[in-house]
Image: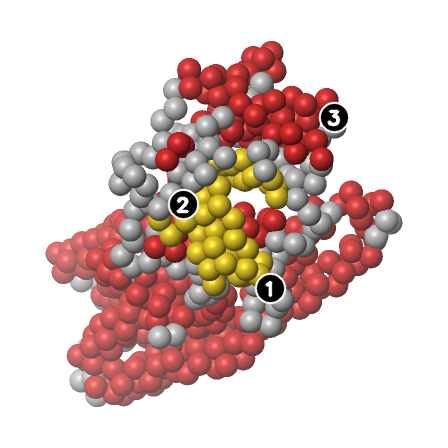
Amino acid sequence: MTSLGRLVKLLSPFRGWIALAVLLSFATIGSSVGLMAVSAYLISKAALSPQMSDLSLAITGVRFFAIARAGLRYGERYVSHATTFRILTRLRVWFYSALEPLAPARLETLRDGDLLTRISSDIETLESFFLRVVVPPFSAALVTLFACLVLGAFDAWLGLALLFFLLLTGVALPWLTHHLGRQPAGDLVALRAELAADMVDQIQGMADLLIYDEGTRMEKKLSALEAVTARERQKLAHIRGLGNGLAALFTGLAAVTVLIIAIPLVTGGAIEGVYLALLPLTAIASFEAVQPLALALQMLDANRAAADRLFQLIDAKPAVVDPIVADPIVADTGCKRISAEKMGLRITDLRFRYGPDQPWILDGLSVSLPPGGRMLLTGPSGVGKSTLVNLLLRFYEYQEGEIYLGEQEIRGCPGDDVRRRIGLVSQRDHFFNTSIRDNLLLANPDAGEAALEAACRAAQIHTTIAAWPDGYNTLVGDNGVRLSGGQRQRLAIARAILKDPRILLLDEATSALDSESEELVQDALDRLMQGRTSVIIAHRLSTIKIAHR
């Protein structure tokens, strides 16, 4: 199935709303056509100075269509935009839900800006899929049928002539602009993504660019990319202008052709003279329905390119696929909450590499850690210490061997179930740009104030937080930028305490700290590890004292 086909399938829950939007759009344009036709008839009839009673029906018709057009236009815009927002909400939730199983393994190769563009700009591009691509063709088909039947009721050739020009404007012209604009539209989506990715890179690395005096070079690179993007936009604008101009030309030709056919019919008595102005004006009004179709096909190209980019990412195979029928993690107590004393860690003949052509990072690792035990892993960078953490967290799938938590091999368990039993404190723990309280509650959303304070006291950070004016409501900034290194680590420890994990992983938890901060954090870590099976990864010899082996 194509990307657009899959996109249409995503819209299926909104079939009723889409149908209502199409009907309202048809009714709105139909009211415009009716208003134009009845107004022309009224003016022509009034020119003959008839009795006022002869004009009453036409006057009522003008009032009806004028009021109806305004009300229907409001209803059409309201329903269309409300449906668009519902669709956008579904698309964002769908994309995030599909993205989550890919993290972090399949997202590491993407640039931050590229991922941001797919999440925001590409999905926002799809906003036009409903408004500009789906609704206009259906509305145009209904209006075309209606207008051609109206003119055909006077004479078949009038209906056929209008049908010809409507098809020329609504089918041939969109095909032409689609053919001319397909490449620029696709290129523009890719260029916008590249521009956003480069912009994010430059902002994130601004300090380094200034230090190495590379700001000017990067500015020139962005300017060149922006110039290329502007050229592609200009191409599309020229194509859009060509389409609008040809649509106006065909509209005028349709009116002239209808007049050429109608005049002999009027002079021959086949049609009353008061209808002569009605016929071309009805034809002109009906073109309101087909003129957006050229833009619709242009937008179709942009939507296809955006959908391709989204599905390209979504279709990536997750590094770890949960079992279809998953066993719960069990120890002696079965499915009940497992105490730390009853959950050990056993690794047997573990082998892992990142790709079939890559060297083995872990080759035959075997280790056993009893419940509550502490094990230190140390060694130079690249030997697989952090890789082991990722395997334990089910972020990557190992090729050979076994990993047991308690008595359960983790490949037989859902990743979420495994991670629920494991706590991680690393040197790169992420903090969201919100309050300390909200960051801590990630570990346990149901935790009360007493539990928060107890966790922070155990992590030796409560006194510091209490001294701040906003206390636990203090905003930490983007990724905790307002916190010192020691404060970040102690908050990470408090968060791990609040989670109350059965297995604890410490990945270089003190590597970036000074000696004073390290001593405080080591103290907090020692409290955290009490009674928990712990794997400690570190380079510093000072960390050895908190391990058993």
Q: Secondary structure at mark 1?
A: loop
Label 1 to label 2: alpha-carbon separation: 23 Å
Q: Which residue is mark 3?
A: 515
Q: Residue at x 34, y 55 (%)?
A: 412
The kind of residue tagged 2 is Leu
| The quadrant where residue 44 appears | bottom left
Q: Residue at x 61, y 44 (%)?
A: 377
Residue found at the very far left of the displayed protein: 53
Label 3 to label 1: alpha-carbon separation: 35 Å
Q: Which residue is mark 1?
A: 360
Q: Residue at x 64, y 29 (%)?
A: 545
- Expressed as whole percent of the image width and height from the top left, the position of residue 115 reads 55, 55
| The quadrant where residue 50 appears | bottom left
Q: Is residue 429 above or below residue 248?
A: above
Specify whether residue 400 is in view: yes
Q: Earlier in the sequence, mark 1 or mark 2?
A: 1
Q: Which residue is mark 2?
A: 405
- Expressed as whole percent of the image width and height from the top left, the position of residue 193 reads 59, 60
Determine contact: label 3, label 1, CB under 8 Å.
no
Is 341 left, or right, of 230 in this rendering? left
Q: Is residue 495 above or below residue 119?
A: above
The kind of residue tagged 3 is Ser
* Residue density around tag 3, few if under 14, some if 14–19, many if 20 or more, within 10 Å: few
Q: Is residue 286 above or below residue 525?
A: below
Specify whether residue 256 is in view: no
Quarter occupied by the N terminus: bottom left
